[in-house]
Image: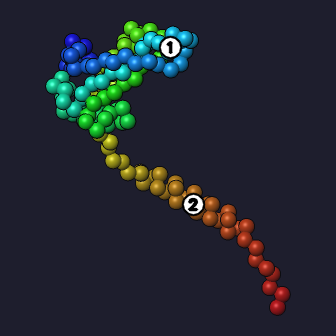
């Protein structure tokens, strides 16, 4: 079991790891050793996730989530399979932890009477300044 929060834990059987060849550093070794990790987690059908966490996770994952609700994480930062596996699992844990935090609802606020008055006074001042710049041709007749 992978502990996410005190209330959420995921069974390791829900995670599928596939090792693929990675681009990047590694010299000749990179062409023959599959060190990159592709982690797949079926978030839509996972019994470990509460519904509200699942909804937030799908929203947070963005392009990493397939149409079927499978979260795909690619880890190719390191040159060893073990470190990439750990990196992928850590990124999954971080994403689920972020989804488990319930956002605070936004409270509607109104500008205060004093701030409205300051804004209108500033507009009046600016208007007078611009009005003084206008050219009035003299009346000769």
Q: Quadrant of residue 66?
A: top left
Q: Is residue 40 left or right of residue 118?
A: left
Q: Closer to the N terminus: mark 1 or mark 2?
A: 1
Whether residue 131 is visible to the viewer of this picture, yes or no, is yes
Mark 1 element type: helix
Q: Quadrant of the C terminus?
A: bottom right
Q: Which residue is mark 2?
A: 123
Image spot of residue 123 (x, y percent): 57, 60
Of residues 36 and 63, the one nearer the viewer is 36
Q: Position of residue 96 (x, y in %)?
A: 29, 25
Q: Residue 136, relative to residue 141: is it above or below?
A: above
69, above or below 73, in the image: below
CB-based contact (under 8 Å), mark 1 and mark 2: no
Name of the residue lying farthest toward the bottom: 141
Residue at x 73%, y 67% (from the top left corner): 133
- Residue 30 - label: 1
- 71 versus 13 height, above or below: below
| Label 2: few (<14), some (14–19) or many (≥20) C-alpha neighbours in 10 Å | few
Say which residue appears at 36% left-offset and 32% top-offset.
Answer: 64
Name, please, the residue furthest toward the right. Answer: 140
Quarter where residue 98 is shown: top left
Q: Within 10 Å of the Cα at label 1, are there few (<14), some (14-19), or many (20+) other Cα atoms?
A: some
In the rendered image, the vertical position of residue 4 relative to residue 134, given as above or below: above
Mark 1–mark 2 distance (CA, rounded to whole Å)? 65 Å
Q: Residue at x 76, y 73 (%)?
A: 135
Which residue does the image show at 27% across and 24% down from the upper left? 41
Determine which quarter of the picture holds residue 99.
top left
Near-viewer residue (121 or 108) = 108
Element marked by disc 2: helix
From the viewer's perspective, tell me whether residue 133 is left or right of residue 16. Answer: right
């Amino acid at each position: 079991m992978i502990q996410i929060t005190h209330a959420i834990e995921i069974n390791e059987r829900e995670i599928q790891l596939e090792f693929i060849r990675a681009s990047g550093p590694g010299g000749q070794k990179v062409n023959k050793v599959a060190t990159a990790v592709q982690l797949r987690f079926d978030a839509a059908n996972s019994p470990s996730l509460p519904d509200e966490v699942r909804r937030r996770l799908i929203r947070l994952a963005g392009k990493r989530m397939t149409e079927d609700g499978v979260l795909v994480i690619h880890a190719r930062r390191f040159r060893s399979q073990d470190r990439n596996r750990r990196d992928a699992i850590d990124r999954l844990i971080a994403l689920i932890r972020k989804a488990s935090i319930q956002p605070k609802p936004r409270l509607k606020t109104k500008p205060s009477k004093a701030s409205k008055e300051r804004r209108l006074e500033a507009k009046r001042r600016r208007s007078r300044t611009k009005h003084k710049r206008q050219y009035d041709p003299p009346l000769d007749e």
